Image: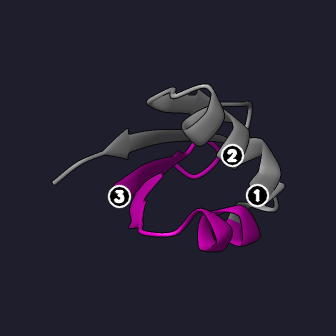
Amino acid sequence: MYYWTLNKKTNEAGISTSIKKLAGSFKIESEQLYYHFSRKKLKEFENDKIRIVKVYL
């Protein structure tokens, strides 16, 4: 599974394959992302800095 990202400050899009790498690059706690994508089974996460969409290719 992949995570499509959109940096809202720079309007730059990207793709990541790991929640840990994603959390590190955007300075978000990985537990917060695991909570949204694994426990709550959500497909999207958004805050004031970034938008993340879980995609299957």
Disc 1 element: helix
Type of the residue with mark 2: Leu
Q: Residue at x 57, y 52 (%)?
A: 10
Query: Are there few (<14), some (14-19), or many (20+) residues within 10 Å of tag 1?
Result: some
Closer to the chain start, of discs 3 and 1, is: 3
Type of the residue with mark 3: Tyr
The residue nearer to you, when weighing 54 against 51, is 54
Residue 31, position in %: x, y?
A: 80, 51
The residue nearer to you, when weighing 29 against 4, is 29
Disc 2 element: helix
Tag 1 near tag 2, CB within 8 Å: yes
Q: What separation in Å lies between label 2 and label 3 (alpha carbons)?
A: 13 Å
Q: Mark 3 highlights which residue?
A: 2
- Name the mark on residue 30: 1
- Name the mark on residue 7: none
Type of the residue with mark 1: Ser
Q: Mark 2 highlights which residue?
A: 33
